Amino acid sequence: MEYSEYFRRFPDAYAKIVAGLDRVNTLYAYLSSSGVLTGAANLLSLGAGSGDVEVRIAKDTGRQIAVVEPSRSYFQQFQQNVAAAGVQDLVLEAHCQSFEAYEPHRQYDVVLSLFSWFAFGADRALLIKALACRQAEGKLLICLPTADCPASKISAFSRSGGINLTSEVLSLWAREQGFDHDYDIYHGVVPAELYLKQGELTEQGRDLAAFLAATPWDEMSESMRTACLEAIASGQTGDQIDHASGCLIFAGGKHATN
């Protein structure tokens, strides 16, 4: 099924997966330590979802934030998160619409696309638009799973379109199009026991596989279930699983665009 239908049938699926991946904490730590936010007073997030990372940045660092999110339910959750964190005064703008429909009225020090570029793919016009949203010396960061990440392996046989893009593929395409950038790895490490127990997937592991494949676990064939188990197990090293992702960092003033 397509993700729009999957979200309709399982509206809490994404929130459960993000919580299991500990993505808010690990992404926040990466953005803080990588230097992406250094010198930035504000940021724009494209496809921000419920905006947990963005709100955390605003609350902990005092940076101003702006978001563009097409899903009404996620946008409403973002608004609730803002209110709960008490950072209303740090929200410069918030739009419940697609990035395609968004009309920029200002530029930002940092523009983020955290696992949302699936929706845009290899679209030169949209990449140019995203780059134009940053200040002349600003940065655009696009984060997507690597090809050997368990998530990418499961998404590769998803019934839904638009989620099979990997960071390596996008990076290669961008360079071929003349968009130079740095490429960094963000390690989303979580305990293996969250997903694996005695050689089988835990309930959380099954939820992750079902979400990535856009196929409820009880509707999967036995061969697909086995493939999901193998994909998640492939990311295990010791007692941890690394959901590694590649980050494309387009830094204004450093990287030329041909």
Image (cartoon, helix red, strand yellow):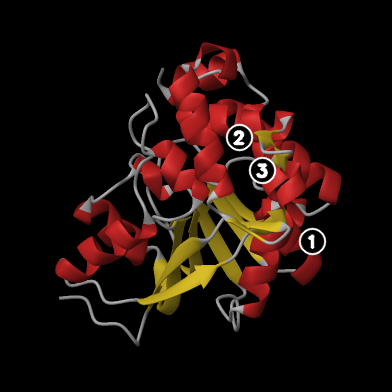
| Structural crowding at the residue carrying mark 3, measured as other residues with C-alpha within 10 Å and reported as few (<14), some (14–19) or many (≥20) | few
| Residue 144 occupies quadrant | bottom left
* Type of amino acid under label 2: Leu
**Label located before the other in sequence (3 or 1):** 3
Q: Is residue 156 above or below residue 176?
A: above
Q: Give the numbered dot on residue 233.
A: none
Snapshot quadrant of residue 42: bottom right
Mark in front: 3 vs 1: 3
Q: At numbered mark 1, what does the secondary structure look like: helix, strand or loop?
A: helix
Residue depicted at 58% across the width and 47% down the height: 233
Q: Position of residue 155 (x, y in %)?
A: 42, 38
Q: Which residue is the site of mark 2?
A: 208
Classify mark 2: helix, strand or loop. helix
Q: Quadrant of residue 81?
A: top right
Crowdedness of circle 2 by 10 Å Cα count: few (<14), some, many (20+)?
A: many
Mark 3: secondary structure: helix
Q: Nearer the viewer, residue 207 or 25?
A: 207
Cα separation, mark 2 vs mark 1, equals 29 Å
Point 30% across, 58% down: residue:
170
Mark number displayed over residue 59: 1
For this view, does 60 lie left or right of residue 109?
A: right
34 relative to 173 in the view: left or right:
right
Let me know if residue 71 appears in the view.
Answer: no
Q: CA distance from mark 2 to mark 3?
A: 9 Å
Q: Is residue 246 above or below residue 115?
A: below
Residue at image position (45%, 66%) is 247
Mark linked to residue 18: 3
Tell me, yes or no, if residue 38 can be seen here: yes
